[in-house]
């Protein structure tokens, strides 16, 4: 069916309306994906590796102290955390967790962001009031991972959790003895 020029002119509004609806649809999809569409953390899937000394336990005497180390060729971070963490290590009343620092979005190195105001203004992430603690943040596209929830991605473009590192206490030292497989980036 051929439309007359007049009929076409009468329908000119269809294009901007369709474009606007498409843009809002995309924004809604994207907002739900970065906020809710995250992979959950399952039971640890550690691949055993050689034991690598991370630090003396006393180097992590205070809550939220951190030690960076390398494991299986990946940059990692060990944290003293305030409570037990899925896949973490508890020694008496002391709790530890360790993660690969390779962001599961596109592979930049995540850092511990201690200030909730930085998370709010730089990362646009405002956790619920009971969850205002340091988070692992990626400076490239501002994904946020929760170290108290097994490294789950809680905000941003990353969907997969950070791979966890298995920790063991040997004497007065903390060792890494395995790590979860790295997920495919960008998924
Ligand atoms: Fe980390 Fe994109 S590389 S959010």
Image (spheres, rainbow, N blue to C red):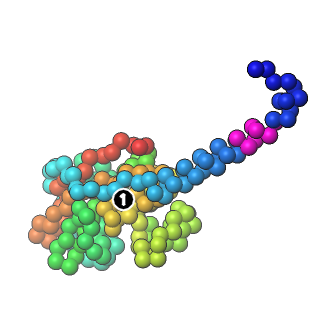
Look at the image and tell me in which quarter the C terminus lies: top left
Q: Nearer the viewer, residue 36 or 57?
A: 36
Specify whether tag 1 is near ligand 1 (CB below 8 Å). Answer: no
Q: In terms of depth relative to the viewer, which is nearer, 70 or 155? A: 155
| Residue 50, horizontal then vertical, whole percent | 15, 50
* Residue 58 quadrant: bottom left
**In-image side of 120 versus 178 (left or right):** right
- Residue 4 screen position, x and y as percent: 85, 24
Report whether residue 183 is seen: yes
Circle 1 — which element? strand
- Relative side of 138 to 179, left or right: right
Per the image, the residue denoted by label 1 is 152
Q: Which residues are magenta?
A: 12-18
Which residue does the image show at 22% across and 76% down from the upper left?
94
Query: At 65% across and 43% down in the image, what residue appears?
Result: 22
In the displayed structure, would residue 108 be above or below residue 14? below
Position of residue 13 measured from the top left corner of the image (x, y, whole percent): 80, 40
* Residue 44 on the magenta span: no
Q: What residue lies at 11% left-to-right and 66% top-to-bottom?
A: 170
Q: Is residue 118 visible?
A: no
Residue that extends furthest to the left in the rendered view of this protein? 171
Task: List the single residue furthest toward the right.
Answer: 6
Look at the magenta stretch and give its main secondary structure. helix
Q: Quadrant of residue 135?
A: bottom left
In the image, residue 95 sits, relative to residue 43, either above or below, namely: below
Q: Nearer the viewer, residue 46 or 114?
A: 46
* Residue that protrudes farthest toward the top in the picture: 1
Tell me which residue sits at (51%, 65%) in the image. Answer: 125
Tell me, yes or no, whether the highlighted magenta stretch contains residue 15.
yes
Q: Position of residue 68 (x, y in %)?
A: 32, 60
Q: Quadrant location of the N terminus?
A: top right
Q: Quadrant of residue 87?
A: bottom left
């Amino acid at each position: 069916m051929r439309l007359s020029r007049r009929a076409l002119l009468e329908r000119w509004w269809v294009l901007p309306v369709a474009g606007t609806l498409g843009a809002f649809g995309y924004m809604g999809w994207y907002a739900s994906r970065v906020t809710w569409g995250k992979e959950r953390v399952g039971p640890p899937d550690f691949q055993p590796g050689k034991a690598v000394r991370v630090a003396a336990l006393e180097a992590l005497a205070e809550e939220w102290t951190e030690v960076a180390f390398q494991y299986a060729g990946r940059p990692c971070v060990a944290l003293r955390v305030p409570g037990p963490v899925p896949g973490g290590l508890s020694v008496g009343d002391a709790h530890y967790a360790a993660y690969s620092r390779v962001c599961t979005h596109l592979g930049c190195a995540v850092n511990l962001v201690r200030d909730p105001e930085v998370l709010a203004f730089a990362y646009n992430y405002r956790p619920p009031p009971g969850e205002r603690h340091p988070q692992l943040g990626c400076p490239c596209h501002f994904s946020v991972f929760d170290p108290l929830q097994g490294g789950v991605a809680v905000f941003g473009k990353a969907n997969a959790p950070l791979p966890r590192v298995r920790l063991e206490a040997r004497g007065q030292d903390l060792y890494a003895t395995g790590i979860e497989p790295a997920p495919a980036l960008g998924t």
